[in-house]
Image: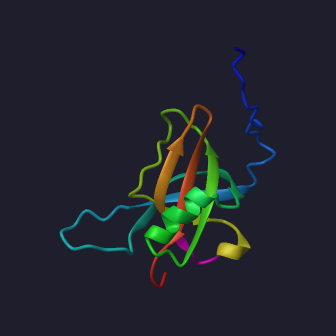
Amino acid sequence: MKPTFEWKKPLNNGRLKTPVHFLSNSYDGPEPSEDELSEVFSTFCEIYNSSMKDIEILNNINAKFGMTIVIRNQSTAFIPTRDLQVKVDDYRYQNQTFNIYDIRPTDDKYTIVLGVVGDD
């Protein structure tokens, strides 16, 4: 019996067109603060239509808006975590800061589900 393999289109620089910035709360005081966001990492991403799995994740958290992005795997230079916030440099998402709700790493890329909950 022959194994079957599904060919996947490789991730290349031509598809990574949108700048994205990963932000962290740099405030270390005892009171919570959302005013002190500093940039941890910036790169280019591909924004694509969310799959049914991504839509289910966003529905479970009652997100009012969400999207899925793909970034190149930077090895140990940057590892995304769920406590970071994301700002996408696109005219459609101006003044919008996204939370990370799901991260799916592979050898060459990270697929990240972003969402906005509440009145952001």
The reply to whether residue 39 is in sight is no
In the current view of this chain or complex, which residue is farthest to the right? 14
Give the colour scheme shown.
rainbow
Instruction: Answer above or below: position of 6 versus 23.
Output: above
* Residue shown at 53% from the left, 79% from the top: 64
Q: Name which residue lies at 50% across and 37% down.
A: 77
- At horizontal 81% and vertical 45% (from top left) the residue drawn is 14
Give x and y (percent) for residue 59. 50, 70
Query: Magenta segment: does it hold 97?
Result: yes
Which of the 4 image quarters holds residue 7?
A: top right
All told, the count of numbered labels is 0
Residue 37 is a magenta residue: no
**Along the horizontal axis of the image, is 91 left or right of 116?**
right
Q: Quarter of the image for the N terminus: give it.
A: top right
Q: Position of residue 95 (x, y in %)?
A: 59, 78
In the picture provided, is 25 more to the left or to the right than 113? left
On the picture, is 43 further left or further right than 119?
right
Q: Quick one: 61 or 52, which is closer to the camera?
A: 52
Query: Is 27 left, or right, of 45 in this rendering?
Result: left
Image height of 4 relative to 118, above or below: above
Residue 103, x across and y down, in percent:
49, 49
- The part of the chain drawn in magenta is 94-99
